[in-house]
Image (cartoon, helix red, strand yellow):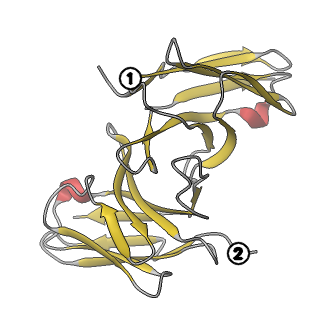
């Protein structure tokens, strides 16, 4: 079992729809969870961080965390073509807790 | 303020040569990380610095890879006797403090290494 798993996609949604991206992780000790967006040829940029069970909203983005199920998701409302990118789920890991383990990423395509 | 910077942005080298990649973290960030991203492998952790010391080197793939950080700022990742499988984008990230894993890491633009 991979440490952090994501569906590679591509996930295609029409403009204005809700995009739902999912991630599961294997380390029950993980405390910090991040969603990064990566455009082709660019470096990852942070979209959301979440540390507690429940929902966290920031503009059109909502992160959801369920530690019991070891599951974290990202919802993008009113999807725009500019949201088309690869979304990476990252989970803190290891003795020092700072190492990030990344999923393989989900490719999102928003069609106008 | 300036973000994380890396140099060079691209590096092409011949198999067997040594290369040095540089990272300049965000000013004031005490923690620095190296990752690499390659097709088929995703984004992999290499090494973590807190100040000038490296408490976690668990991701370095072989003893050909080494890294150092001086003055609590600039870091250099060195790959000796490069192999074709070393071809990847090497990403550096920094964070303000190692707050038990709750700290946000900010990435630089990366160095694309191609080993011929």
Q: Nearer the viewer, residue A90 or A69?
A: A69
Chain letter of the residue carrying label 2:
B
Q: Nearer the viewer, residue B62 or A7?
A: B62
Taking B40 as reference, is B7 left or right? right
Is label 2 in a helix, a strand or a loop? loop
Q: Nearer the viewer, mark 2 or mark 1?
A: 1
At x 47%, y 81%, the residue is B74
Q: Is residue B84 above or below residue A83?
A: below
Is label 1 in a helix, a strand or a loop? loop
Task: Say which residue label 2 marks.
Answer: B2
Question: Residue A53's spot in the image, x, y percent?
Answer: 65, 22
Evaluate if marks 2 and 1 touch, with contact meaning CB atoms under 8 Å apart: no
Q: Nearer the viewer, residue B16 or A78?
A: A78
Question: Residue B75's spot in the image, x, y percent?
Answer: 42, 77
Taking A3 as reference, is A12 left or right? right
Have a look at marks 2 and 1 and say if they share a chain.
Answer: no
Separation of disc 2 and disc 1 at Cα?
35 Å
Q: Residues within 10 Å of mark 2 (few under 14, many from 20)?
A: few
Q: Quadrant of residue A50?
A: top right
At x 72%, y 16%, the residue is A13
Taking B109 as reference, is B53 left or right? left
Quarter of the image that includes the C terminus of chain A: top right
Taking B55 as reference, is A109 left or right? right
Q: Residues within 10 Å of mark 1 (few under 14, many from 20)?
A: some
Q: Nearer the viewer, residue A60 or A13?
A: A60
Question: Residue B42's spot in the image, x, y percent?
Answer: 39, 40
Q: Quadrant of residue B80?
A: bottom left
Chain letter of the residue carrying label 1:
A
Specify the label residue A26 is tagged with.
1
């Amino acid at each position: 079992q991979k440490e952090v798993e994501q569906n590679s996609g591509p996930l295609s949604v029409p403009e204005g729809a809700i995009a739902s991206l999912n991630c599961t992780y294997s380390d029950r000790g993980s405390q910090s969870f991040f969603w990064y967006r990566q455009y082709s040829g660019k470096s990852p940029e942070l979209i959301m961080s979440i540390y507690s069970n429940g929902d966290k909203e920031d503009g059109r983005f909502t992160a959801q965390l369920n530690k019991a199920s070891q599951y974290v998701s990202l919802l993008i409302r009113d999807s725009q073509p500019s949201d088309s990118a690869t979304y990476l789920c990252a989970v803190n890991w290891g003795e020092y807790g700072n190492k990030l383990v990344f999923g393989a990423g989900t490719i999102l395509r928003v069609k106008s | 303020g300036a973000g994380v910077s890396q140099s060079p942005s691209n590096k092409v080298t011949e198999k067997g040569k040594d290369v040095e990649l540089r990272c300049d973290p965000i000013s004031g960030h005490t923690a620095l990380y190296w990752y690499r991203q390659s097709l088929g492998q995703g984004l992999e952790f290499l090494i973590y610095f807190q100040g000038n010391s490296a408490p976690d080197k668990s991701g370095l793939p072989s003893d050909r890879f080494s890294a150092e950080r001086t003055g609590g700022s600039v870091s250099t990742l060195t790959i000796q006797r490069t192999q074709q499988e070393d071809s990847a984008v090497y990403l550096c990230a920094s964070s303000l403090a190692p707050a038990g894993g709750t700290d946000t890491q900010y990435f630089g633009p990366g160095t694309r290494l191609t080993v011929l």
